[in-house]
Image (tube, grey):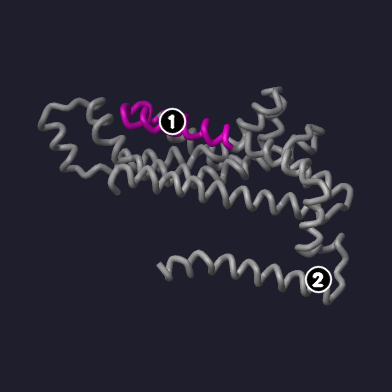
Amino acid sequence: MTQVRLDRAAPVALGVVVLAAWQGLVWAFQVPDYLLPGPVAILGAFFAAPRLLLGSLVSTLAVTFAALLAAALLGVAMALLMALSRIARAAIQPWAVVLQVTPIVAIAPLIIVLVGNPFISLVVCATIVAFFPVFANTVTGLEAVPPELLDLFRLHGAGRGRTLLLLRIPAAVPYFLSGLRISGGLALVGAVVAEFVAGSGGFASGLAYRILEAGYRLEIPRMFAALVLLAVAGIGINMGLGAFAGFALRRRGE
């Protein structure tokens, strides 16, 4: 129990030390806020407009979670199709790789123009970024069934659909949860990148737009405050999905 507490306290202690050293160096060398604000200035910028920043955070998180849900549904559906049909595998896999390697920065403006609706276009961009880990991990899980278990199901006359439902899908759950945790962070990244592109075009939404706005106005402490909120959101998403995965696996007895 003591070791667990130490493991949890270590990153917090390191963070406190780094922040204290950062603030001390800023004070010691009298670095102006427009070059590098210290933690005190960043905290002050947040409390100067908490409603504005938190409202933008909610907007970014709405895009993130909508994209994560879409990526999970799309990734699982395509993985199941590939498990059921070799033709589907041959058709889907190359296009899934294309989605993975295509830079979202390059196609985000086109998506925003074609879709029209700002929120849906942001979700589409973030979904493209978050899709592949769920898809790839689920495919790996569906294929990770021991051959002897597959032979046992065939011996008892189980068809492809029944084998998928009773054997392959349960075996793929841990892989899916691992991919979902990775996709959570990528959905946030995709949402922020899409918001940067949309913000450059005049669509005010999310923390990425606040970062652009603060940069144009040289309000560097506010820009850092938005970056800190994004970092905290990313950590929260990762920890939340990790806790969900742990809970789901414990319910399965793993």
Closest to the observer: 234 or 151? 234
User: Quadrant location of residue 42?
Assistant: bottom right
Three-letter code, disc 1 = Ile
109 horizontally vs 219: left or right: left
Give percent across and percent down for residue 96: 48, 35
Label whose residue precedes the other's in the sequence (1 or 2): 2
Name the residue beneath numbered marker 2: 26
Judged left or right of residue 118, residue 94 is: left
Q: Which residues are magenta?
A: 65-90
Task: Determine which quarter of the picture holds residue 38.
Answer: bottom right
Q: Residues within 10 Å of mark 2 (few under 14, many from 20)?
A: some
- Is-magenta flag for residue 125? no
How far across and how far down the image is residue 242, in percent? 46, 49
| Residue in front for this viewpoint, 45 or 180 | 45
Q: Is residue 230 above or below residue 164?
A: below
Identify the disc placed on residue 37: none
Distance (Cα) linking label 1 and label 2: 53 Å
Find the residue positioned furthest to the left: 155
Instruction: Determine the residue positioned at 41% across, 28% down.
Output: 77
| Residue depicted at 55% across the width and 42% down the height | 101
| Place of residue 231 in the rendered image (x, y in percent of width and height, measured from the top left) | 64, 52
Q: Disc 1 designates what residue?
A: 92
Q: Hey, what amino acid is under mark 2?
A: Val
Above or below, 133 relative to 19: above
